[in-house]
Amino acid sequence: MEQFTYIGKDMKRVDTASKATGEALFAADLTFPRMLVGKVLRSPHPHARILAIDTTKAEKLPGVKAVVTAKDTCGDRWGVFKYTQDQQFLPTEKVRYVGEEVAAVAAVDEDTALEALSLIEVQYDILPAVFTIEEALAPGAPQLHEFYENNINIHVKIDVGEVEKGFSESYLIREDIFQAPEDAYFQGEPYAVAAQFDHAGNLEIWMPNAGPHLKAKPLSNVLKIPLNKVRVRKITIGGAFGGRSEIAPADVICAFLARKAKRPVKIVYTREENTVCTRQAHSMVTKIKTGVDREGRVKARDIVCHMDGGAYSSTGPIAVSVPFLCMEQAYRMDNVRYNGYRVLTNKPIRGMFRTHGRAFACGVDIQLDMLGAELGIDPLTMRLRNARQTGDYTPTKSYVASCGMTECIQKTGERAGWKEKFGKLPPYHGIGIGCNSVQTGFPMGIRGGSQAFIKLNEDGGVTVITGVVDNGQGNDHMIVQIAAEELGLTPDDVQLINADTEVTPSDPGSYSMCETFIGGNAVRLAAQDVKKKLFKIAAEFFGVREDQLVAKKRKILVLNDPEKSMSIAKAVRIALSRNESISGEGSYWPNVDSKREWVKNPFGQLSETFSFGAVIVEVRVDPETGQVEVLEAWAAQDVGYALNPKVIEGQFEGGLTMGGQGGMLSEFLQWHEGRVLNPTQLGYLVPLAIDMPKIHNIIVETIDPNGPYGAKEAGMSVAMSAAQAYSGAISNAIGVYLKEFPLTPDVILKAIEEKEHK
Amino acid sequence: MKEMKQRAITLTINDEIQKMIIPPNRTLLEVLRDDLHLTGTKESCGEGVCGSCTVLVDGQPTRSCLTLAVAMEGRKITTIEGIAQGDKLHPVQEAFVNYHGIQCGFCSPGMILTAYALLEENPSPTEEEIRRAISGNVCRCTGYAKAVEAIKSLTEERR
């Protein structure tokens, strides 16, 4: 492998010093002269017709500068897809969940804004509501929308190979149902948005986002202003985990308030609003039937999954598909049928979550354990026998260019001492394994590719301009690292302008794990474009060929002739004096099948490449209390190539914590008639430092042929494998396979008691 | 709305004297963020659980969202803006940067101040003591491993 200066090295991130000093500004930290406080009035009913909204009293309250309702909008319906345009930012006819936006005010301070909300009179005609998948699908159930029959929002149907034949040839078949309630993103930063218009009608807006361009287009549509007047600005973002990708009603409402008040407005969500009124993760019921041969190889699989999507589509078609697609990537399954349904209920809206589909992933993985137990084959061997391999095609026809699934399973197994432990641990002591795979950017229409510019300055420093956004995972650093490496500069020589729609070109956003692969490749190509121009000048100057040159230490060097070198600054000055362009451009469009569509045509190349991961955990269960002590964890992922190993380890550790420790032991939303009972930090239990076991990180590198330096993505396959490892280990410890998640102490105690009664 | 009676207070924040007139129900967090624009102190849960609003009051980690500013008269308050020496990061800040204890950074100011106070009180904490100390600071990104390593690097044995 080529010798790199920065790539593959542990580097401290360019963005974290300002976070350590408190200088980094998040959206809620912004203030502007004459800025107003925005507050949102929300529906107290899960399902109701809006008969009238009277804002007269609120408008008359001193200090109130603007009140907006649906009347101030054109009633546009938003949807990620043309066929899912079902959500109005301020509804005109009905509210469909407790917490839905109804009106909003901007006032001189928070107290005045809150008092104004209390003065808005809304007349509702309360309608019957549905709160569960069963209720929503029952004959004669109240319908949320006119255009989704039987409250079925999305149905994805995939049928590959000969499923029935596969079952008839199977040695052993099992059918099980796995389920889990909703979980919450619980980003550290509660949602916040600040907006202002300038004298020329340009909107400047700041909010946590997973793609500034994904926010700008719908804002342009709704505000009826061209895209070049919508300036979604860069801001530090306090975590996304899939939950900041779409336009949010608060964005639109804040912009409407700012336009009406002719003053800057800031809306800062409370923790409760962030839990209820942004996005939640789907609850899920997954029925899985799997047939295997005597060696445990899967001959056929039939999956029916129902997801509770809440009141609107959000990213519905993607959400229904992804849990299945991840698993069809991770494991070979030639004969497979999938029916995924997203069902609408009068509950908050569900989106794509970092560890989306714990009931699905646990289902597929735990069922392998169950089948293996009947066959006398251990879980690790079951996975090795079914693991995806390089050069395979997935059932839905994606070519797998590089795959380290087997290596991940083997290495975690070796490091964890699987052979010495499985089946040999003392009572109530268990070990479990989970595997999964994720994409590195799927087809995203016009925004599927990324473009980047690089501007050189006469002192040899550069400014990189890219739409890539950092949600906290380190994307800013990744871009700087790549540019510095390619151009032979130091990270200090690279200035970054990113995630600002006024300046930065199109980019998919930090969505579908694509920023390293797509955004990183675009920046690398832009840097190579610049380098080519610099080398042309230097080659002429030294009378050598361009391929005899390298860029290192701010210089252009002639290989094997250390006497000959030129500073990059000098080459830039030569270009400027000759009136030659010295800026660079790069763009990367991933090799995905543009004809692939989530519902109508779920076949073709889904993502240019895929990452693969395996997690093993060892636990001890207290049979008296049902408490789980996690002793140690091992996390492995095929990341392609580790650009910055410490960043990757941080992603493994964070993903395991969220997906396993939180997702399998403590995190779930509780409900009463469509109301979330535990939206606060006290009620929703996210893992603490004292809960966490020692985590061993195992980076597997397969050098993807097309990733930047062979890189894929930095840890999502670990995040998506952790829940299975946790549930497998607990099942192993107590000797009962559990199918309802998360595995809280009461669930575990009940399972132990039932086992003892048998 | 009835006007609440205002109170004059003098606060010592990061060694600077601040004279202010505030309503008695104003929290320290509101005074820091909204009145003094010391926005390094964050609000995440608003109910004293997450630790994002942690500041030091006479050296003790304190939830500023649950603390009334009027009760801080005569106390010494340190926020995240107050521990670096000019351009030089405080060793705790530097360790969090060097050991990748920071991802999104929203919880970092609170966690760094908690670690700062821990090390002032106990220069050689065990891993268990470190984990206990920062268990009042919720982080959604890192899984805590790298933050613990950062703090460990500063213990007396490791220096």
Image: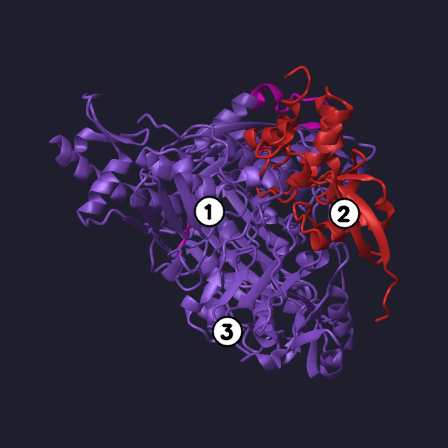
Q: Nearer the viewer, mark 3 or mark 1?
A: 3
Q: CA distance from mark 1 to mark 2?
A: 47 Å
Question: Residue drawn at (74%, 72%), measured in percent from left and top?
Answer: A45
Display colour for chain B: red
Q: In this picture, is A28 found above or below A253?
A: above
Answer yes or no: is residue A436 visible.
no
Tell me if mark 1 has few (under 14), some (14-19) or many (20+) residues whose alpha carbon lies within 10 angstroms of its own.
many
First to last magenta residue range = A416-443
- Look at label 2 and name its amino acid: Gln
Question: Tag 2's secondary structure?
Answer: strand
Question: Residue drawn at (48%, 52%), measured in percent from left and top?
Answer: A511
Question: Tag 3's secondary structure?
Answer: helix
Give the residue at mark 2.
Answer: B18
Please, which chain is the residue tagged with disc 1 on? A
Q: In this picture, is B156 found above or below B63?
A: above
Left or right: residue A598 compared with residue A661: left
Mark number, residue A222:
3
Q: Which chain is purple?
A: A
- Look at label 1 and name its amino acid: Met
- Look at label 3 and name its amino acid: Val
Labels 3 and 1 share a subunit: yes
**Residue B20 in picture, x, y percent from top left:** 79, 53
**Residue B51 in picture, x, y percent from top left:** 73, 42
Tell me if residue A430 is in the magenta stretch: yes
Q: CA distance from mark 3 to mark 1?
A: 28 Å
Give the residue at mark 1.
Answer: A513
**Residue A526 in picture, x, y percent from top left:** 30, 46
- Please tell me which residue lies in front, A109 or A330: A109
Q: Nearer the viewer, mark 1 or mark 2?
A: 2
Left or right: residue A38 compared with residue B20: left
Name the residue furthest left.
A543
